[in-house]
Amino acid sequence: MKLLLLSLLLVCNLMAISAKEYAPTLNAMTDMNKAYAKAESEKKHMILLLVVKDGCHWCEKMVEQTLQDKAVKNALSDTVIVISDLDSDLAKIFKAEQTPSMFFIDVKTKKSLYEQVGYEKPSAFMISIISAEDNLE
C-alpha cells in the first residue's frame, strides 16, 4: 500500500506543469518586458498575468478549460498573456500569494486594473475580463 501511494505521488509530481510548459499552450510569454514591447507594437492595451504553481490542480483547470474556451480566447484576443510561476520575481512584484492568480495590467500605466484569485469557469472569467476592460484609462 505504501509503495502504491508513493508511486502515485511520484507520478503526480511528474505531471506537474510549470509556467514555461504552459506558455505554448496559451501562446503566452514568460517575460514581462517582452510582453510590454509586444503589446505596444501590436497596439494592445492590456496584459493578463497568470501566476501558477507546479502541481496546482486549479491552475491546470484554469489553463486547460477556462483559457482554452473559445469565447474566452476571443475576449482575450487583444490581450497579451504572460504566465509566471508563484516563486518568480514577477509574482512577488504583484504580490501573488495563491494560485491561480490573474492580474489584468494596463500597458500604459503598468498597473493592475483588476485581480482575480482562484479558478473561474469560462462564464465567470468573461465577467473578470469585462471588469478589467472597464478599468482601462
Image (cartoon, grey):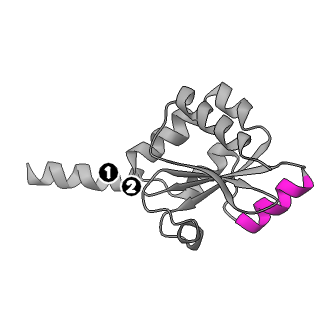
**As shown in the figure, which amino acid type bears the numbered disc 2?**
Leu
Q: Which residue is mark 2?
A: 14
Q: Find residue 17 and report its horizontal and vertical position in percent.
A: 48, 53
The answer to whether 90 is drawn above or below residue 76 in the figure is: below
Q: Find residue 103 and report its horizontal and vertical position in percent.
A: 60, 53
Badge 2 element: helix
Task: Residue at 61% x, 28% y: name it.
Answer: 69
Q: Which residue is mark 1?
A: 11
Closer to the camera in the image, 25 or 70? 70
- Label 2 near label 1: C-beta < 8 Å? yes
Mark 1 Cα shell of 10 Å, populated few (<14), some (14-19), many (≥20) = few
Q: Find residue 80 and report its horizontal and vertical position in percent.
A: 75, 50
Query: Does the image show residue 68?
Result: no
**As shown in the figure, which amino acid type bears the numbered disc 1?**
Val
Task: Residue at 57% x, 73% y: name it.
Answer: 89
Magenta segment's dominant SS is helix
Residue extending furthest left?
1
**Measured Cα–Cα span from mark 1 to mark 2:** 5 Å
Q: Find residue 15 and report its horizontal and vertical position in percent.
A: 41, 50
Total count of labels? 2
Badge 1 element: helix
Task: Residue at 55% x, 29% y: name it.
Answer: 122
The answer to whether 43 is drawn above or below residue 68 in the figure is: below
Residue 37 lies in the magenta-colored region: yes
Dividing the picture into quadrants, the one containing residue 34 is bottom right
Magenta segment: 32-41
The answer to whether 60 is drawn above or below residue 38 in the figure is: above
